[in-house]
Image (cartoon, rainbow, N blue to C red):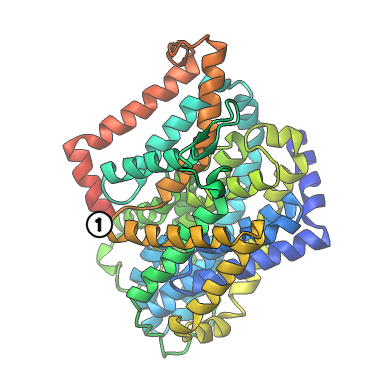
Amino acid sequence: MMETFSHLSLGFGVALTMQNIALCFVGCLVGTLIGVLPGVGPIATISILLPITFGLDPTGALIMLAGIYYGAQYGGSTTAILVNIPGEATAVVTTLDGHQMAKQGRAGIALGTAAIGSFVAGCVATVAIAALGAPLTKMALLFGPAEYFSLMVMGLCFAVVLARGSILKAFCMIMLGLLLSTVGTDLETGQERLSFGIPALSDGIDFSVLAMGVFGFAEVLRNLENPEARDVVKAKIGRLLPGWSDIKQSVAPVLRGTAIGGVLGILPGNGAVLGPFASYTMEKKLAKDPSRFGKGAIEGVAGPESANNAGAQTAFIPLLTLGIPPNAVMALMVGAMTIHGIIPGPQVMTRNPELFWGMIASMWIGNLMLLVINLPLVGMWVKLLQVPYRLMFPAILIFCCIGIYSVNNQPMDVAFTAMFGLFGYLLIKLGFEPAPMLLGFVLGKLMEEKLRQALIISRGSFVTFVERPISAGLLVVAVLVLVVALLPSISKKRDEVFTE
């Protein structure tokens, strides 16, 4: 316990410098902004802003990017409540009761409940990260190459099962991501692989090029195809602080939502997205009068919003302790760490304690900032919601092109980004989700490295992966997850959940 407190004091010492406070504020503000504006998600935004972080120190860069991620979870609820359009995928559930509350003249109460629930969940999740960080890191230090390879296989299996759409399509996306990660010169043999004689591909596909194309450009094309009609609530927002009766109704859902979201956020494969849905289902089942849900029940806002923010923050646990990204945003974080020369994994805590504990401390500061940013600036967010998308997308594209060109000063990078943008748009049209592909791409190089190391140690014997107890256990879990997901009854239920 005393060791954790000393680490936290180190973290607050790092997070409370003027530069890091400013970067945390910028991240939270930008995150809230892109959460509020439909059609601009955290994945696309972080992809666009990656080049800007090159000039920052690693800790400051990751503090800002983290702020964008959990800030977007806050901002998504504003759009969901006021416009009935989820600004973020995880805010879909909030539209059900939040918008109904707004129509009844209780928009302020809904916004206040969402902000306070998110703040409580964020603080609890940050404490969980601090408490679990050290034990998990010590456990991860016991891992060898075989265990790391098996852990990544298990993570990708979870990603397949928890991705939207068919399991076969998600599996294909994972394999495509792994294939793309092999493009370029093999560092051990010096042989070029899958470069097709194109000099620009001899160093491999740049992470920021792929991410910005598949998520930035493709998202713009998708939104232009489906322009949304924004019906901003005309009624007065009213007071933002919930009354005593509202608080009494919200306390239990907030605590339950925090617990559900916190646990699901740790799961590899975007389990954090399922948190709000699971919370809403639980609140509806526990309610004395389930018919209230969908008609303005405050529990339908408090629980899912708490689960949303708790999951967004506990998603950092596998990233910071094991170096395994549980979702596409965390994959971008891995890319950012790699760009700054930091190898994700258990060594981060011992080799870069300022980065590890500075990020954790900044999360608490960021949650406090978001509470201050969200409630007083509601009027400004309402004005922004009235800006049509056709006026925003040219600025987004210009910013993308400038950002990607500034990475290597190569015009070819901009061309590749545009190509990946068209490819990403095609994937979306065909019903493929690009997020598993990004996870496969990020983990591909590390998986290949660990596979080679394990085989060198075992003199080429694949038996090493089942001889070592931890590695064998992880592979068994991976196989079980896939087998259970493929069972007809489970597969049908899974499709129903994602359809809903």
Q: What residue is drawn where x is 62% and y is 79%?
A: 376
SS category of the residue bearing label 1: helix
Q: Is residue 330 above or below residue 301?
A: above
Q: Which residue is mark 1?
A: 499
Q: Nearer the viewer, residue 242 or 98?
A: 98
Q: Is residue 165 above or below residue 387?
A: above
Q: What residue is drawn where x is 82% and y is 51%?
A: 13
Q: Is residue 234 above or below residue 266?
A: below
Res 312 visible: yes
Res 305 visible: no
Quadrant assignment for the N terminus = top right
* Residue 106, image quadrant: bottom left
Position in image of residue 128 (x %, y %) = 60, 43
Position in image of residue 42 (x %, y %) = 52, 62
* Residue 489, image quadrant: top left
Kind of residue sitting beneath label 1: Thr
